[in-house]
């Protein structure tokens, strides 16, 4: 199953070409794994397309990006700053067979406003994020795990595919979760003025915490479970055989 998934990812990523070159430093690691650190300048968003395991930490200092993987993977790896966005992708040649190893990426930035994850990779943050607003987009079969987000304005989550998003602690003026597909999103520790959950498909959204005005919309066979979310006012709209619980 894993070999099949890796082959699919190789096919999906065919045709991507490099548009930028950055300074990189290489250090030896155990076995044939190596770590490269990249000087990318200031970034406030991340786009990871492929088998990337991104570990994020907010810092008050300069941006830091370090990639650990097998030496051969660096030959087709692209790391660049595209107008403030850290882009991580693999440039794979058509017709060539690849056996790709996991790619570990450690990222430290002062600000983070946008995360996009596609493929079967992951994004994790265990030490919290403070920001004006944060938008998370996930497509494919990847996973997003973030602990403690504090946003002055909004937190937006948009998913498609069969991936998972888990937020433990979400403070914002507005919280919006929109799902297309069969994924799973769970947001606990909500403190917001508004909370909106929308499902089109067969996915599941689970919400817990406190909000002022809650809006739930479901079209399909999915589930919105908001029994643990205390709301002052609730509006719900359901079409299909799915369920909304609050």
Image: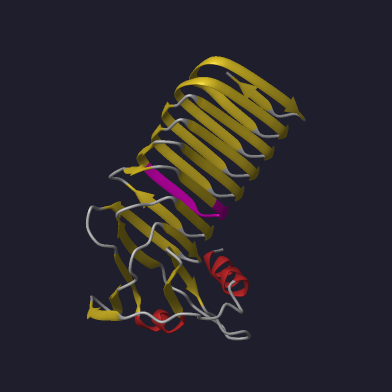
Q: Residue 123's x, y, as percent?
A: 41, 54
Q: Considering the image in quadrants, where does the N terminus appear?
A: bottom right
Q: Residue furthest top?
A: 232
For image coordinates 60% across by 40% down, the residue present is 178
Quadrant in which residue 12 is drawn: bottom right
For image coordinates 71% across by 24% down, the residue present is 237
Q: Residue furthest right?
A: 240
Q: Nearer the viewer, residue 50 or 128?
A: 128
Q: Considering the image in quadrants, where does the C terminus appear?
A: top right
Question: What's the magenta region?
Answer: 138-146
On screen, residue 78 versus residue 198, left or right, reads left
Q: Residue 162's x, y, as percent?
A: 59, 49
| Up/down of 238 relative to 75, above or below | above
Q: Residue 64's x, y, as percent?
A: 28, 65
| Up/down of 228 relative to 148, above or below | above
Is the image coloured rainbow, by chain, by secondary structure, or in one colour?
secondary structure
| Up/down of 29 relative to 130, above or below | below
Magenta span contains residue 127: no
What secondary structure predominates along the stretch shown in magenta?
A: strand
Q: Nearer the viewer, residue 41 or 224?
A: 41
For image coordinates 33% across by 54% down, the residue present is 56
Magenta span contains residue 143: yes
Q: Nearer the viewer, residue 117 or 142?
A: 117
| Up/down of 189 relative to 14, above or below | above
Q: Residue 40's x, y, as percent?
A: 34, 71
For image coordinates 54% across by 69% down, the residue present is 6
On screen, residue 115 versus residue 244, left or right, reads left
Q: How many marks?
A: 0
């Amino acid at each position: 199953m894993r070999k099949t998934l890796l082959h699919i990812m190789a096919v999906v990523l065919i045709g991507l070409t490099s548009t930028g070159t950055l300074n990189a430093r290489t250090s030896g690691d155990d076995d044939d794994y190596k770590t490269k650190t990249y000087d990318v300048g200031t970034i406030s968003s991340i786009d990871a397309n492929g088998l990337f395991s991104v570990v994020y930490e907010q810092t008050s200092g300069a941006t830091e990006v370090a990639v650990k993987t097998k030496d051969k993977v660096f030959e087709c790896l692209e790391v660049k700053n595209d107008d403030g966005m850290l882009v991580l992708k693999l440039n794979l040649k058509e017709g060539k067979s690849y056996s790709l190893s996991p790619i570990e990426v450690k990222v430290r930035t002062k600000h983070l406003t946008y995360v996009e994850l596609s493929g079967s990779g992951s994004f994790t943050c265990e030490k919290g994020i403070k920001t004006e607003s944060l938008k998370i987009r996930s497509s494919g079969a990847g996973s997003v795990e973030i602990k403690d987000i504090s946003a002055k304005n909004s937190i937006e989550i948009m998913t498609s595919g069969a991936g998972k998003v888990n937020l433990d602690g979400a403070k914002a003026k507005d919280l919006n979760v929109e799902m297309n597909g069969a994924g799973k999103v769970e947001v606990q520790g909500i403190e917001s003025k508004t909370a909106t959950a929308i499902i089109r498909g067969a996915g599941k959204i689970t919400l817990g915490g406190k909000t002022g005005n809650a809006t739930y919309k479901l079209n399909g066979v999915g589930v919105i479970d908001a029994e643990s979310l205390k709301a002052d006012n609730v509006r719900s709209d359901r079409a299909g055989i799915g369920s909304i619980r609050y």
